[in-house]
Image: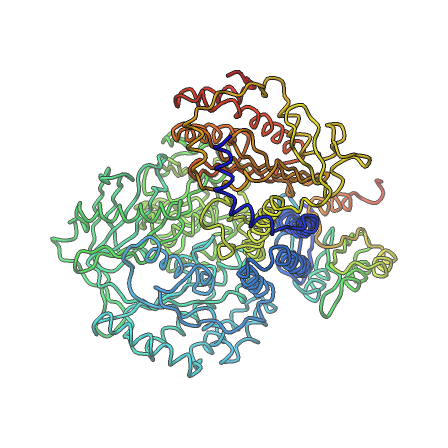
């Protein structure tokens, strides 16, 4: 036993230090249990809030404030107890909670907002500013900062600038009255006029001036700006496509920019924009407007890219529309565009090319604004993108889709240097078609007695089978007269049609393309729509009854009369609960409360600073409290009443009972029957499971022993005796079997969330290759039983949390078996295949070696 | 002809969520943020069930209840409130409120209550 002696002397230094460090384990354990109780209270409130705000209950802001206030109180108590337990070891945690707390309180009490940034450059937009810069600007900043693609330079006047503008011009009261007066048109006109005449706080004006100075430097004097809307909700669930004003070709001086700003803000109160919002159940008066000021791209060509072809059945190709000049040509449908269907995978081969007759294009006018210019005859039919440019654009579009994991609707431009610049990216809505007969393939047979009026003309934007009276929108009729349930027929498509979309049965237009603003809005409202149908306005008479069958495969038929035989049931409500603005807005606070981001305690970012939600903070406190308890148990003051387990396997497991872990009348020697501690019983039962324990431990060679003795790692356990610190629900067991040092720590309660099983194994007495095999074998087994594991050299650590009582005890039983089983395994682990086989056997309850 | 339900609550989310959920059941639903315009609407045309918040500025839920009962004795009124207290509940029961829910209200229970409210009085 000279080697053991040597080992002890090597470690004696640590041993003597440890002797001094006695911990009052009872008090640590009490502190730990207190934190479990605190956390339990907080989690119950979180669960209650999640349930009440899941959509199954009518709730209001009063409930949210009350519930959150209770949660915050519970968190304060928990943090104080945690600091006490860990002796203030994590001072960063409280500030992190404070910042989350402040954010939630601001959301719950929007009027109590502190001063916020009114102007942010695109480079500086962080996720927490997402709401302040509006959806559209935020997405563009992500394309630049996170996806790494070229976007124009610029800055954002945030919703806080908007608040200041509104206050400065005393418009708050007018806004408050809008809702009560049901957005009466006269009031809206008055409000727009007051916005257009509005002044700016001097400080805000100065900020804009400075930002413009920087922008002018960037574009070396020759810049022209686009000033465009980015409402809080724009491009979030709904696109607001074409609803708000964008002012193009604005000169980069402060007066021109602020004037454009007024025009954009005024467009919040246009009748169309208000109608759109009311139709989607928004509260238009509450919508705040952020405005993006960005350098314009002097585009050679531009257009729209859909990363999924919304008309195709297959989702393997994307759809790109392109025309000469600025992008308005495509989104406002000023001219025919080129259409490219491109494969979604490299090398982004075009599968279909349709060249439009691009007779006009929009360009920047010298005096500001845009002008329409004729395209020279030789370029009208020429492709506006070459193959290389198309592939590059497709590559960038796919990068954006991969970032968002959702199909995107992207506006892009090709600058004078042939470089692709992304102007905007938003979610592309692709939905199941409206009710009715399946619209798979459209044939041109009459439907019963209903003859075919037209077929296979145009592009299906949104499929469905609907019937109704045709209503022609032209010079002689207005949208105000549009009857409920009619089919809108018009020469050109227009985003203004949004006003009637909730009651329109369908829309058919002679011109138009699938990527226009109106097309986006049609999909949002789930209105069956066909554009570019050629001569629909000639073939269909206003007032006559027709049926439109628009197929998912892109085919369409219009029948004369209402073909009731093929029309489905009622049109589903186009709003779903989860799309409801007020619901999403209220639920938004849960993003800072319920999600769990801090999952794996073994990763480097398991840090206070990484806590983003209240739940993360609870998780962090639980984990670190558990660590504190494990550490404390190892240094428990064993001068306290020490007893000894009297079981056949091992003679020297000592026991410290810190509360109800043993039956009351237990003497110095403890029999199995006297153990009250559920986790210790489970481990002991596992250890004594038939076959798992062998009396004859495998042979250990001298060289294995030498290796073990020379190691300096985390070996101080070896100087301790085998010790179990227990309570009725708690176990910390540190044992040495031969040259294996194992720690098991477990808390097993009736509440799953409180429970954990922690297992740590450091093996000695084997050559390196065997030790490596052993930890990998253990990893396989532990993972099978639900552990999250980490390996450092030949130290393996695993944790199971959040399991119910029965499962925790089952896991502990397996841990007991594993401890017994590994005792025998060092010598036999001669190859990886053998190790795998032993892991497999263990999992199947076969303990033969 | 579907049944007409009126919802009065000064918080938009309550009306919006109630509307979506009740329309699923085939009811025709109108929502109001203020009792004033709601009562004006009621003078013009009847509703089968009125669901009203209790605490609202200007006109409160009890007043809504009294006015509805005066105009249409057969229209059922369901009261919802965040400030559930016994006095008000007793007052409301005296005034023949059909049902009384503290917020947050489980939508399933509200639907069930409305279903019962729509059973004509002579058929128990």
Q: Is residue A447 visible?
A: no
- On the picture, is A37 further left or further right than A158? right
Image location (x, y in percent) of residue A234: 44, 59
Q: Position of residue A333 (x, y in %)?
A: 30, 55
Q: Is residue A447 above or below residue B18?
A: above
Query: So how many labels did they put on this image?
Result: 0
Extreme-top residue of the structure: A848
Q: Is residue A195 above or below residue A475?
A: below
Answer left or right for A749 relative to A500.
Answer: right
Q: Residue furthest bottom?
A: A202
Up the image or down, A72 lies above or below A215; here it is: above
Residue A495 visible = yes
In the image, A419 versus A8, the foreground residue is: A8
Query: Does residue B39 appear left or right of residue A291 in this picture?
Result: right
Q: Residue at x 66, y 47 (%)?
A: A637
Residue toward you, B4 or A826: A826
Q: Please name whichever residue, A46 or A731, is drawn nearer the observer in this view of the structure.
A: A731
Q: Residue at x 46, y 41 (%)?
A: A713
Q: Return the x and y of residue A487 as percentages of the image width and height.
A: 45, 47
- Colouring mode (rainbow / by chain / secondary structure / one colour): rainbow
The residue lying furthest to the left in this view is: A378
Q: Could you tell me residue A468's position as x and y percent?
A: 48, 44
């Amino acid at each position: 036993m000279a080697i053991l002696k040597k080992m002890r002397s090597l470690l004696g230094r640590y041993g003597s230090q440890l002797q001094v460090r006695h911990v009052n384990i009872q008090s640590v354990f009490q502190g730990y249990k207190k934190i479990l109780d605190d956390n339990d209270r907080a989690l119950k409130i979180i669960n209650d809030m999640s349930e009440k705000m899941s959509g199954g209950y009518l709730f209001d802001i009063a409930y949210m404030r009350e519930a959150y206030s209770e949660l915050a109180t519970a968190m304060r108590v928990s943090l104080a107890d945690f600091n006490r337990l860990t002796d203030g070891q994590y001072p960063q945690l409280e500030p992190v909670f404070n910042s989350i707390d402040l954010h939630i309180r601001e959301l719950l009490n929007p009027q109590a907002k502190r001063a916020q940034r009114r102007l942010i450059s695109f480079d500086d937009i962080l996720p927490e500013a997402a709401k302040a810069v509006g959806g559209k600007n935020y997405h563009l900043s992500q394309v630049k900062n996170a996806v790494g693609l070229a976007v124009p330079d610029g800055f954002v006047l945030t919703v806080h600038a908007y608040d200041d503008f509104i206050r400065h011009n005393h418009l708050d009261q007018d806004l408050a009255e809008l809702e009560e007066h049901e957005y009466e048109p006269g009031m809206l006109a008055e409000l727009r006029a007051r916005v257009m005449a509005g002044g700016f706080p001097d400080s805000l004006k100065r900020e804009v001036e400075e930002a413009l100075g920087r922008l002018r430097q960037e574009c070396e004097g020759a810049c022209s700006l686009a000033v465009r809307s980015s409402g809080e909700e724009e491009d979030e669930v709904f696109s607001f496509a074409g609803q708000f004003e964008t002012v193009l070709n604005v000169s980069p001086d402060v007066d021109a920019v602020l004037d454009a700003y007024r025009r954009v803000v005024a467009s919040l109160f246009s009748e169309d924009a208000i109608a759109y919002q009311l139709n989607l159940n928004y509260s238009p008066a509450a919508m705040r407007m952020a405005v993006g000021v960005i350098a314009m791209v002097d585009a050679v060509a531009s257009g729209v890219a859909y990363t999924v072809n919304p008309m195709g059945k297959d989702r393997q190709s994307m759809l790109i529309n392109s025309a000469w000049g600025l992008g308005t040509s495509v989104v406002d449908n000023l001219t025919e565009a080129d259409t490219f269907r491109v494969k979604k995978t490299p090398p982004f081969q075009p599968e279909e090319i349709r060249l439009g007759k691009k007779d006009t294009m929009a360009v920047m006018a010298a005096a500001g604004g845009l002008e329409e210019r004729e395209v020279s005859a030789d370029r009208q039919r020429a492709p506006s993108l070459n193959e290389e440019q198309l592939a590059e654009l497709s590559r960038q579009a796919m990068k954006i889709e991969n970032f968002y994991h959702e199909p995107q609707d992207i506006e892009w431009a090709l600058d004078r240097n042939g470089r692709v610049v992304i102007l905007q990216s938003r979610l592309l809505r692709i939905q199941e078609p409206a009710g009715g007969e399946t619209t798979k393939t459209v044939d041109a047979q009459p439907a019963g007695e209903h003859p075919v009026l037209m077929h296979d003309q145009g592009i299906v934007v949104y499929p469905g089978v609907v019937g109704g009276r045709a209503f022609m929108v032209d010079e002689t009729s207005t949208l105000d007269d549009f009857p409920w349930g009619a089919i809108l027929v018009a020469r050109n498509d227009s985003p203004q049609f949004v006003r009637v979309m909730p009651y329109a049965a369908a829309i058919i237009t002679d011109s138009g393309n699938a990527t226009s603003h109106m097309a986006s809005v049609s999909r949002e409202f789930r209105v069956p729509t066909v554009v570019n149908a050629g001569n629909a306005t000639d073939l269909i008479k206003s007032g006559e009854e027709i049926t439109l069958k628009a197929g998912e495969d892109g085919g369409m038929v219009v029948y004369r009369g209402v073909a009731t035989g093929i029309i489905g049931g009622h049109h589903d409500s186009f709003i779903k609960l989860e799309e409801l603005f007020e619901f999403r807005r209220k639920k938004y606070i849960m993003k800072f409360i319920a999600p769990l981001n801090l999952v794996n305690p073994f990763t480097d970012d398991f840090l206070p600073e990484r806590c983003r939600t209240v739940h993360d903070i609870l998780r962090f406190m639980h984990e670190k409290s558990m660590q504190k308890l494990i550490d404390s148990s190892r240094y428990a003051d064993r001068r306290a009443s020490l007893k000894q387990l009297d079981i056949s396997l091992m003679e020297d497991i000592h026991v410290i009972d810190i509360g109800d872990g043993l039956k009351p009348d237990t003497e110095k020697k403890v029999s199995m029957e006297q153990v009250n501690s559920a986790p210790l019983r489970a481990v002991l039962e596992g250890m004594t499971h038939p076959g798992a324990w062998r009396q004859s431990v495998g042979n250990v060679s001298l060289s294995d022993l030498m290796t073990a003795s020379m190691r300096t790692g985390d070996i101080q356990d070896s100087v301790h005796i085998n010790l179990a610190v227990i309570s009725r629900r708690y176990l910390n067991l540190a044992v040495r079997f031969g040259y294996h040092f194992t720690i098991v720590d477990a808390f097993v309660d009736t509440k799953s969330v409180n429970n954990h099983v922690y297992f740590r194994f450091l093996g000695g007495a084997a050559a390196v290759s065997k030790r490596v095999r052993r930890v990998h074998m253990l990893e396989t087994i532990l993972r099978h039983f639900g552990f999250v594991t980490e390996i450092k050299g030949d130290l393996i650590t695993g944790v199971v949390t959040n399991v119910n009582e029965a499962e925790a005890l089952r896991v502990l039983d397996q841990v007991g078996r594993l401890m017994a089983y590994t005792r025998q395994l060092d010598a036999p682990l001669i190859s990886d295949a053998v190790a795998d086989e032993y892991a497999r056997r263990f999992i199947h309850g076969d303990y033969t070696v | 002809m579907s049944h007409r339900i009126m919802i009065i609550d000064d918080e938009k989310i309550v009306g919006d969520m109630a509307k979506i959920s009740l329309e699923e059941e085939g009811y025709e639903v109108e929502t109001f943020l203020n009792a004033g315009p709601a009562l004006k609407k009621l003078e013009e045309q009847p509703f089968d069930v009125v669901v009203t918040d209790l605490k609202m500025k200007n006109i409160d839920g009890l007043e809504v209840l009294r006015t509805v009962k005066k105009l249409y004795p057969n229209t059922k009124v369901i009261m919802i409130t965040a400030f559930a207290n016994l006095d008000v509940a007793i007052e409301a029961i005296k005034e023949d409120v059909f049902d009384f829910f503290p917020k947050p209200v489980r939508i399933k229970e509200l639907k069930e209550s409305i279903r019962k409210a729509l059973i004509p009085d002579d058929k128990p």
